[in-house]
Image (cartoon, rainbow, N blue to C red):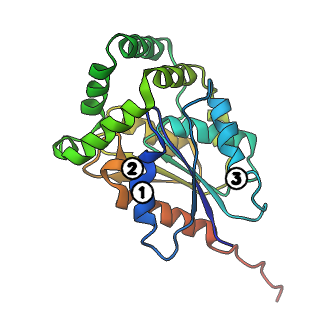
């Protein structure tokens, strides 16, 4: 049965964040069926997870389902997994984290909310320069596409997403119980969710593999889409490997 890959965007993303990865996947014979969640209208991470789940809830239970979240989408993926642990066959966390909000990080997010309301365009430019690898900043098409996407999201949705992130649940106790294949992907120059966050995920997840992405900051689905696609295909292959047959008594 053909696997289904559920892609979940991050904060300030339309579904277009995944377009380069989907294009790269489509060139492979083993490409999965892809569905992409919309995380722009909900008030909470839990509501995002519910809406994402609605895209795959009707699948036959034996359909291999791989859930992949980018940045904030990783929080949504963990929320979805907590609600439906027996229906997800593999998980990918791309430039994401399992950390919870702290008083210090809440202050930073509140400042971001204020900046979005005060000067949206300036805040967008600051996020672009902070989240991309220096080499990516020289790619006019990539930068322009990211800018257009963020303007399409708009300040109201970005503020709503930021408040949802502040109120997210702590799913770290769940992670050690998972027995499904997990892929962790992180740009080596990620300053938004730094490498330490991915290293913590690796410690928390017993069946995880960590893939570092060179020449990438936080926006790996845009900056290094073919590499991200290649790692996702490898994760899907892990799901499709048949379980060992039981030993025959001699």
User: Badge 1: how crowded within 10 Å, few (<14), some, or many (20+)?
Assistant: many
Disc ID at residue 21:
1
Q: Secondary structure at mark 3?
A: loop
Please identify the residue farthest to the bottom as the structure is shown. Answer: 250
Residue 232 appears at what percent x and percent y?
48, 60
Most foreground residue, 239 or 125:
125
- Identified at 70% across, 38% down, the residue is 50
Residue at image mark 3 = 56
Q: Earlier in the sequence, mark 3 or mark 1?
A: 1
How many numbered marks are there?
A: 3
- Identified at 54% across, 34% down, the residue is 98
Residue 187 appears at what percent x and percent y?
34, 45
- Identified at 39% across, 46% down, the residue is 186
Residue 23's place in the image compared with 131, above or below, is below
Q: Secondary structure at mark 2?
A: helix
- Residue 124 appears left or right of 68: left
């Amino acid at each position: 049965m053909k696997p289904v890959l559920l892609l979940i965007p991050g904060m300030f993303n339309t579904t277009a964040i995944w377009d380069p990865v989907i294009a790269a996947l489509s060139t492979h014979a083993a490409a999965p069926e892809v569905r992409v969640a919309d995380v722009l209208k909900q008030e909470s991470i839990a509501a995002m997870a519910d809406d994402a789940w609605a895209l795959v809830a009707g699948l036959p239970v034996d359909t291999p389902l791989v859930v992949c979240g980018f940045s904030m989408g990783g929080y949504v993926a963990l929320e979805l997994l907590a609600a439906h642990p027996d229906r997800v066959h593999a998980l990918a966390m791309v430039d994401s984290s399992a950390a919870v909000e702290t008083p210090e990080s809440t202050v930073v997010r509140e400042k971001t909310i204020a900046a979005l309301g005060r000067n949206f365009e300036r805040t967008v430019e600051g996020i672009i320069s902070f989240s991309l690898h220096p080499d990516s900043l020289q790619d006019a098409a990539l930068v322009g596409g990211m800018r257009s996407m963020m303007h399409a999201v708009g300040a109201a949705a970005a503020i709503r997403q930021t408040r949802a992130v502040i109120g997210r649940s702590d799913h770290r106790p769940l992670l050690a119980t998972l027995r499904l294949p997990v892929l962790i992907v992180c740009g080596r120059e990620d300053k938004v969710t730094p490498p330490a966050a991915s290293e913590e995920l690796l410690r928390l997840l017993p069946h995880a593999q960590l893939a570092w992405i060179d020449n990438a900051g936080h926006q790996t689905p845009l900056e290094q889409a073919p590499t991200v696609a290649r790692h996702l295909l490898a994760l899907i292959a892990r799901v499709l490997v048949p379980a060992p047959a039981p030993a025959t008594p001699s």
